[in-house]
Amino acid sequence: MTGIGRTRSISLAGLRGDVVDVEADIAQSLPGFTLLGLPDQALQESRDRIRSAARNAGLPLTRRHLTVNLLPAGVQKRGAAHDLAIVLAAYAAAGQVRGVHGPVFLAELGLDGTLHRTPETVAMVLAAVDAGHPRVVVAAAAVEEARLVPGAEVRGFAHLHEVILAFGGRPEGPPPVPDAARVLGAGDGPQEAEETDPHRAAPDLSEVAGQAQARFALEVAAAGGHHLLLSGPPGAGKTMLAERLPGILPPLDRRTALETAALRSLRRLRPAAGALDRTPPFEAPHHSASMSALVGGGSGLARPGAVSLAHGGVLFLDEAPEFDRRALEALRQPLEAGEVVLHRAQGAVTYPARFQLVLAANPCPCGLDDGTGHRCRCTSLQRRRYAERLSGPLLDRVDVQVTVRPVEARHLTGAPAAEPTAAVAARVRAAVERQRGRWEAAAAAGLVPPGVLRNAHVPAPALRHGPHAVPAAARGAADAAVDAGELSARGHARVLRLAWTLADLRGAARPADQDVETALQLRTRHEEDR
């Protein structure tokens, strides 16, 4: 007796996934295999692949006409990750397996029936759990990745023969790969993934000689989630400082770490085996990177770019003025929204992109402009054109802008070792916890949107009005800078956010006038050592 066989799979569009209901029907007609529901070329090819896999698993597909429909019909289905769901729906239509309508099946099939992991496993399992379908079946090689998703009930198999047996089928012959099969029973349930040490291999801040003001700016940026511009001559330590920023950032929360792992899986970057990496990512694209490489792109549905791979961490643009002007300007939207929306002919995708931007720039094309004019070989026109490569609207979104002066010899030889990463990270983490408690309470009271946890993301009205406004007596310097035309309205809000961060680092309950004044200095590339 035959009927309609049903299983489930996932179709991804960015990090958003649609649950695909796979229907199979066997008709009393000539042999054939019809696949409906907007499949792409890779999925169209699954018809021959599935027939071979089924035969080599010991349970060939029906010789009658098999029609498979992928719902919703209007959603484009891509890739071979639907293979396992399709073959089990066909078996269910023939009455050869049972209990396959509940789980979500995510695996590719080899011609010999072997199950292969799909590179997007983490993103697909995350989408399945978010859609209310925690039971997932994957290839054995993808089990550890799938287990990274909290709440996922994972079953892993190495061969289609084993899947058939697990769901009540009776394939002929012994399992083709009995030693390699890895099966997690339904009773195993969800298991918590291990977590990596957030600072396991970060370079240490103690290696940076001198640069007291730049180190202080780095600490402030880390504590509040602020964007940072480091301007100075070659060899002053700009890159060293930027590379050490992830080491003093707090570890990623579980959701952000999971989103980061899912984004990397979309770029075929496999996560560490069995471990949820909570280390803030660090992306440093070369200045020749295209706009697509920076913000995302590609044929078909756009893939995530460096801004999304840096989600929760740092995007470092060394030699920032050398980047393509259009690519730099494309950063303005994700800097404000914390996400990037990419439109293509086949549809629009949205990727999270809540990162800290760190720009490093020389003071002029030759890099030798130290403010005295003694060594610089550039003309005034060359210096002006070089500076204009970083537009005003982009720099207006960068909270902390400091000049990194050349290192003095006394800092290289005679000075004691600078403060290590661990000490700075402890202060940053304490400041972050103060912010988290304050803004979570504010969100509960409806004063800020849900999910705002860092000072850099607080809406401007909350900084100027209400219980968390910076006192009028304290913000006098910022108000005067606006009246003098030195600060835009956006810049005014960013100074107030910086003031809150400075207060949090001091352990103060509210920003004082000294915090606002220091914030203004950090914002305007104050050149004297702190």
Image (tube, helix red, strand yellow):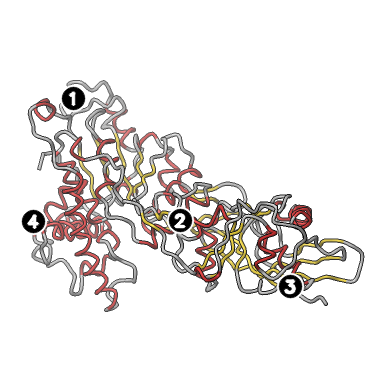
Q: Position of residue 459 (x, y in %)?
A: 29, 66
Query: Which of label 3 and label 2 is nearer to you?
Result: 3
Instruction: Name the residue tied to disc 1.
Output: 373
Q: Residue at x 22, y 63 (%)?
A: 433
Q: Secondary structure at mark 3?
A: strand
Q: Secondary structure at mark 4?
A: helix
> Considering only order in the chain, which callout, 3 or 1, is on the residue closer to the N terminus?
3
Mark sitting on residue 341: none
> Considering only order in the chain, which callout, 1 or 2, is on the residue closer to the N terminus?
2
Instruction: Name the residue tied to disc 3.
Output: 5
Label 3 and label 2: CA atoms lie apart by 39 Å
Mark sitting on residue 340: 2
Does 366 appear above or below 259? above
Q: Residue at x 61, y 47 (%)?
A: 299
Left or right of residue 416: residue 24: right
Left or right of residue 288: residue 106: right
Q: Amino acid at mark 4?
A: Gln
